[in-house]
Structures are given as C-alpha cells and as structure tokens.
Image: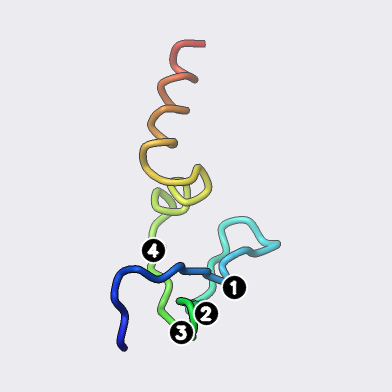
C-alpha cells in the first residue's frame, strides 16, 4: 500500500445513530491514500471499550464508579 507509518489517518463511517451498531467496513484516509477496511468490533465488551475511547479509559471509569 505504500504506507510509511508517518501518515495522518482519518477514519470515516464508524459513527452510527443506532447504539451498538457498527458498519462492516469504513473508509480510511491516510494522507493521499484512501482505502476501505473491515471493522472488527465483534462483542458487546469491545463495543463498550470503543464507546469509552479504549480499554484504559473504560477501566478508569469502571474504577471510579466502584469508588462512588
């Protein structure tokens, strides 16, 4: 694909108006390259991680909820 690792990536098509719904594919713009990739958010747990911005923010929010 000619990627160097120095590209700036923009992913479009992941946001959905339906909670828990993820598309099968999204479009990735990497500087002047544009390509489609398959989305792999397979489980409800992975959906929770994504909604919280990743595993670490998910864990931190979970710990904060336990302290309350």
Q: Nearer the viewer, residue 16 or 43?
A: 16
Residue 34 place in picture, x, y as percent: 49, 85
Which picture quadrant has residue 6?
bottom left
Residue positioned most to the right: 17
Can you identify the residue that label 4 sits on? 42
Q: CA distance from mark 4 to mark 1?
A: 17 Å
| Side (left or right) of 43 relative to 17 | left
The residue wearing badge 1 is 13
State if disc 1 and disc 2 touch (CB < 8 Å): yes
Check disc 2 and report the residue beneath it: 27
Badge 2 vs badge 3, beta-carbon distance below 8 Å: yes
Q: Under tag 2, what secondary structure?
A: strand
Q: CA distance from mark 4 to mark 2?
A: 18 Å
Q: Is residue 62 above or below residue 6?
A: above
* Rendered residue at 65%/64% (across/down): 16
Q: Residues within 10 Å of mark 3 (few under 14, many from 20)?
A: few
Q: Residue at x 42, y 80 (%)?
A: 37
Instruction: For label 1, count other residues whose C-alpha is less than 10 Å away and answer few (under 14), some (14-19) or many (20+).
Output: few
Q: Nearer the viewer, mark 4 or mark 1?
A: 1
Rendered image quadrant of residue 23: bottom right
Between discs 4 and 2, the one toward the N terminus:
2
Q: Which mark is residue 36?
A: 3
Would you say the residues marked 4 and 1 are in contact, meaning their CB atoms lie under 8 Å apart? no
Q: Position of residue 36 (x, y in %)?
A: 46, 84
| Nearest to N terminus: mark 3 or mark 4 | 3
Counting residues from the N terminus, which is met first, the one under dot 3 or under dot 1?
1
Classify 10 Å Cα crowding around label 2: few (below 14), some (14-19), many (20 and above): some
Instruction: Of the two numbered discs 2 and 3 on the same chain, state the one appearing first in sequence.
Output: 2
Front one among 23 and 27:
27
Looking at the rendered structure, the secondary structure element under dot 3 is: strand
Q: CA distance from mark 2 to mark 3?
A: 4 Å
């Amino acid at each position: 694909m000619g990627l160097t690792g120095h590209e700036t990536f923009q992913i479009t098509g992941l946001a959905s108006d339906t909670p828990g719904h993820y598309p099968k594919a999204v479009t990735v713009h990497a500087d002047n390259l544009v390509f489609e990739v398959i989305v792999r958010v397979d489980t409800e747990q992975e959906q929770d991680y994504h909604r919280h911005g990743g595993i670490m923010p998910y864990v931190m929010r979970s710990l904060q909820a336990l302290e309350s």
